[in-house]
Image (cartoon, rainbow, N blue to C red):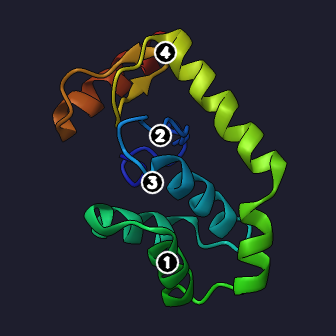
Amino acid sequence: MLDKNPKNVKFVVKHFPLRNHKFAKKASIAALAAHKQGKFWEYHHKIFQNMRSLSDAKLQDIAKEVSLNIKKFNRDMKNPAIQKLIMRDMNEGNRAGLRGTPTIYVNGKLLKSRGFQGFQQMIDEALKKK
C-alpha cells in the first residue's frame, strides 16, 4: 500500500498487547527499545517469527540477532517513556473498542476487507473526500 500510494498513505503503528499473551507487553517494550536503535521492523518481525517461544531470554537473543547494543537495549527496556507510550496506545485502543490485533483503520474507519483490494478501495474513498 505504501509503495502504491507514497504521497497519500501514512502507516502508523499503535501498540495493543493482549493480556492473554504472557509476553505481549514485554515484546512491545522490546520492539520500542529496538526502535531507539533504528531496528523496530527487524525486531518486530523476529518477535512474530518466535511468537510461541517468547521469554525474557528470547527477547535478549533477538536483540543480539538484530545487532542491537545490548546495554542500551536493556536500559531502554526500563525506560518509563516507552512504557507510558504503550499505556497511551492501549488506552486509545480500549476507547476505540479494540478486541484483538492487528486492527486496521483507514482515516478512522475500521478496515473490514483486509486484502489489497479492500485496502486500496478505502484509500481511494478517503482520497475522494479530500
Against 97, residue 100 (above or below) is below
User: CA–CA distance between discs 4 and 1?
Assistant: 38 Å
Q: Which mark is residue 108?
A: 4
Work out whether mark 4 precedes mark 2 in sequence or the reverse, and give the earlier one.
2
Provide residue 37's location: percent of width, then percent of height.
71, 74
User: Is 80 displayed left or right of 40 in the figure?
Assistant: right
Query: Which is closer to the viewer, label 4 or label 2?
Result: 2
22 and 47: which is toward the camera: 22
**Quadrant hosting residue 116:** top left
Residue 130 visible from this viewpoint: no
Where is mark 3, residue-wise? 23
Mark 3: which amino acid?
Phe
Where is mark 1, residue-wise? 57
Mark 2: which amino acid?
Pro
Work out whether mark 2 precedes mark 3 in sequence or the reverse, and give the earlier one.
2
User: CA–CA distance between discs 4 and 2?
Assistant: 20 Å
Against 46, residue 105 (above or below) is above
Where's the C terminus, which quadrant? top right
User: CA–CA distance between discs 2 and 3?
Assistant: 9 Å
User: CA–CA distance between discs 1 and 3?
Assistant: 11 Å
Where is mark 2, residue-wise? 17
